[in-house]
Image (cartoon, grey):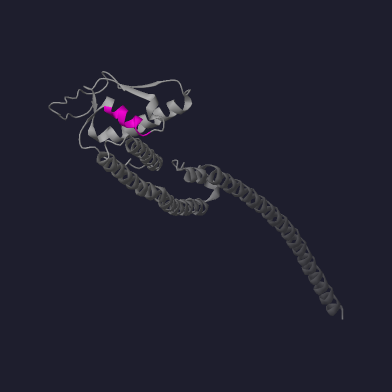
Amino acid sequence: MLALTVLREREQRRVLADFKRLHIAHQRLRTSASARESALREEARELNQQWRDAWDDRTSAVQRLTTHLVQERIAAVASGAPIPDAPSEPQAGDDIAEALHDVVQVVREEITRRDAQHADRREALRQVPVALARRVQPSAHRIQESATRLADARISDELVQETMMRIDHAAAQQARAAQSLAVLCREWPGQQWPDPMAFVEVVRAASGRIVDYRGVKVIGDRTLAAAASVVEQLIHLVAELLANATSCSPPTTPGRGRGPAGTARRYDHRRRRRRRPR
């Protein structure tokens, strides 16, 4: 019995010692787990803060790129100016930069397409008054030809001569209005002259295309001439100037149309030589 009692006590002491060791190990494990948990939580907070900072930087970079896109790049595309480069924003990422670049390309293609459509519409609208002007001019010239033939046939009849002269001038004014309409539409006046014309004749022809042609006295040097390629333009320009001068002057004020001197090439009426204009 004594031996059993001794053995039991020894076993109890051994079990108690094992229990103490297990308890100490458990406490150590709990302390280690708590420290590990705290470390993991701190690391998670740091990672979360880093992620938030990175997201804020990316959002700010994207906002700056978007603002520059709208205010600078798309505005340049709309105005036809050179497109500036996008600012360097590494935080935004290459995918965002490529997407914004694609936006610029899409806007450019759309504006180009719409400009082409508008250009076609403007050209079509421009051709309408040009076509009307081209139809009026031949009609006015036919009226002038008919009036001239009738005046030549009734050369002794003063009333017919006076009437035909008025008809001729009215047709000339109609043709000038058609020419002005064509010029405003960026078209050639239409009529061509085969030979150079003296400036005094240019002024005389221009005075015949205005209402108050009687109030213009043409003077000048007949040795100065305009090249044939610019005769019609000069006649039309001088006619507009004379029309403005006579309409803005008192009815009793005489007007003079003087050809320029020394500003154009010489024109020989006898040889009718053509030289290249300056």
Say which quarter of the image contains residue 210: top left
Q: Locate the N terminus and report the quarter of the image it occupies.
A: bottom right
Name the outermost residue toward the front. 157
Name the outermost residue toward the bottom. 1
Name the outermost residue toward the left. 271
For residue 49, above or below residue 228: below
Is residue 93 rendered to the left or right of residue 269? Answer: right
Name the outermost residue toward the top. 262
The tally of labels here is 0
Is residue 272 rendered to the left or right of residue 33? Answer: left
For residue 87, above or below residue 246: below
Q: 251 or 23, which lies in front?
A: 251
Say which quarter of the image contains residue 221: top left
In percent of width and height, residue 22 lies at: 76, 67
Q: 4 or 258, which lies in front?
A: 258
What is the magenta range? 201-209
Q: 162 or 38, which lies in front?
A: 162
For residue 13, above or below residue 70: below
Q: Locate the C terminus and report the quarter of the image it occupies.
A: top left
In percent of width and height, residue 167 lies at: 36, 40
Please tell me whether residue 117 belongs to the stretch shown in magenta.
no
In percent of width and height, residue 142 lies at: 30, 46
Residue displayed at 39% across by 49% down:
132
Magenta: main secondary structure equals helix
Is residue 26 rendered to the left or right of residue 52? Answer: right
Residue displayed at 76% across by 61% down:
30
Is residue 16 rendered to the left or right of residue 104? Answer: right
